[in-house]
């Protein structure tokens, strides 16, 4: 079965969830119209061109191409933003429900209409990972088709641009969290169910003591997420993912952002830069990776206990200094 048909059938099966998708068929029509228009243009310009290179004309067109560039890339970008936004929003809801405790848990369960069905929450998480994978493949295939028709690398350049803007769905920290969630469930409770084959090749591995999340989600989608903090050069503890996609220990991120643990990363200046890629303004939208934290804590118990003691002492020290400075400021000392 061709991927286009497979993708359409998948999206039709998701109609009840009202998930946005890539207009794979419409984008292919744009490319088909591009080849037809260029072919007619060349035929009208010179009959010799048709005789010499009609086969090549049917497969490729000139670049830059006003037919494609005026509608293809803007349409793909719009659809990509909708897919990533929907995935992030729904993944956040799933993880909020799963991690909620006490009264908050009751409130979140009611708000998201899962009605206490934890199995439905887990299945929703698996479905979202499948949704991310098939849309990532769809975007790769349509960009590959663009490059083939135009005999160029503009499709690859567009993909690189999307990744540099942190808009690729495979870069989403929520995908990392969902994978960590299902590894935790598989290893602690033996929960599988529908869609569990997605995570059969997902593992937390250690190479020379350096951890990474290794995932082969399909033949075309392979992820390798480094879990070593680039600041302390140790396994990330209480990990946070900055909006640039780099993962650090929470305390290390606070130090690099020149803020205290009490103030948190939201108090960083907009000019504060990621210590790895030097991109500015990446702290305030950072995300705590709670499921990944649980996974690492369970797999590295001795290291986790040691770091917990150290971080607890540092938190107490910074909290004490914070309230002392607040008290002096209040008293005008």
Image (tube, helix red, strand yellow):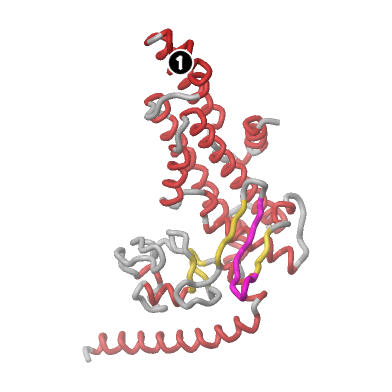
Q: Quadrant of the C terminus?
A: bottom left
Residue at image point 65% right, 67% down: 204
Label 1: element kind:
helix
Residue closest to the far left:
332
* Highlighted range, magenta: 206-217
* Category of crowding for the residue at label 1, using alpha-carbon neighbours closer than 10 angstroms: few (below 14), some (14–19), many (at least 20): many
Q: Is residue 105 left or right of residue 276?
A: right
Q: Is residue 122 visible?
A: yes
Q: Which residue is mark 1?
A: 39
Q: Residue 282, located in which quarter of the rendered image?
A: bottom left
Residue at image point 41% right, 85% down: 319
| 235, above or below 273, in the image | below
Residue at image point 42% right, 46% down: 161
Q: Name the foreground residue: 219 vs 281.
A: 219
Q: Is residue 70 visible?
A: no
Q: Name the foreground residue: 200 vs 153.
A: 153
Residue 269 position in % (x across, y down): 31, 67
Q: Give the main secondary structure, helix, strand or loop, of the magenta stretch.
A: strand
Q: Quadrant of the N terminus?
A: top right
Q: Name the foreground residue: 13 vs 309.
A: 309
Residue 212 part of the magenta segment: yes
Q: Residue 251, located in which quarter of the rendered image?
A: bottom left
- Counting labels gives 1
Residue 169 position in % (x across, y down): 53, 49
Residue 37 part of the magenta segment: no
């Amino acid at each position: 079965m061709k991927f286009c048909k497979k993708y359409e059938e998948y999206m039709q099966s998701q109609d009840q969830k009202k998930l946005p998708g890539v207009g794979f068929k419409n984008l292919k029509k744009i490319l088909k119209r591009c080849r037809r228009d260029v072919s007619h243009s060349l035929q009208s310009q010179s009959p010799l061109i048709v005789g010499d290179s009609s086969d090549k004309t049917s497969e490729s067109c000139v670049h830059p191409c006003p037919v494609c560039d005026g509608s293809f890339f803007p349409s793909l970008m719009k659809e990509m933003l909708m897919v990533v936004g929907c995935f992030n929003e729904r993944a956040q809801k799933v993880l909020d429900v799963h991690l909620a405790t006490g009264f908050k848990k009751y409130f979140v369960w009611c708000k998201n209409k899962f009605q206490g069905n934890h199995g439905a929450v887990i299945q929703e998480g698996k479905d979202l990972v499948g949704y991310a994978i098939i849309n990532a493949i769809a975007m790769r295939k349509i960009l590959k088709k663009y490059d083939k028709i135009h005999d160029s690398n503009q499709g690859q350049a567009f993909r690189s641009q999307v990744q540099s803007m942190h808009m690729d769905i495979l870069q989403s920290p929520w995908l990392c969290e969902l994978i960590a969630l299902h590894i935790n469930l598989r290893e602690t409770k033996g929960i599988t169910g529908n869609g569990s084959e997605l995570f059969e090749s997902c593992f937390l591995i250690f190479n020379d003591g350096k951890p990474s999340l290794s995932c082969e989600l399909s033949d075309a989608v392979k992820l390798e997420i480094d879990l070593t903090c680039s600041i302390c050069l140790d396994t990330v503890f209480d990990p946070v993912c900055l909006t640039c996609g780099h993962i650090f220990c929470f305390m290390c991120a606070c130090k690099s952002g020149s803020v205290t643990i009490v103030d948190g990363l939201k108090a960083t200046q907009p000019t504060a830069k990621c210590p790895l890629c030097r991109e500015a303004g990446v702290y305030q939208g950072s995300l705590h990776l709670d499921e990944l934290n649980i996974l690492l804590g369970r797999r590295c118990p001795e290291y986790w206990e040691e770091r917990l003691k150290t971080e607890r002492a540092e938190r107490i020290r910074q909290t004490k200094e914070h309230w002392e400075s607040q008290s002096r400021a209040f008293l005008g000392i």
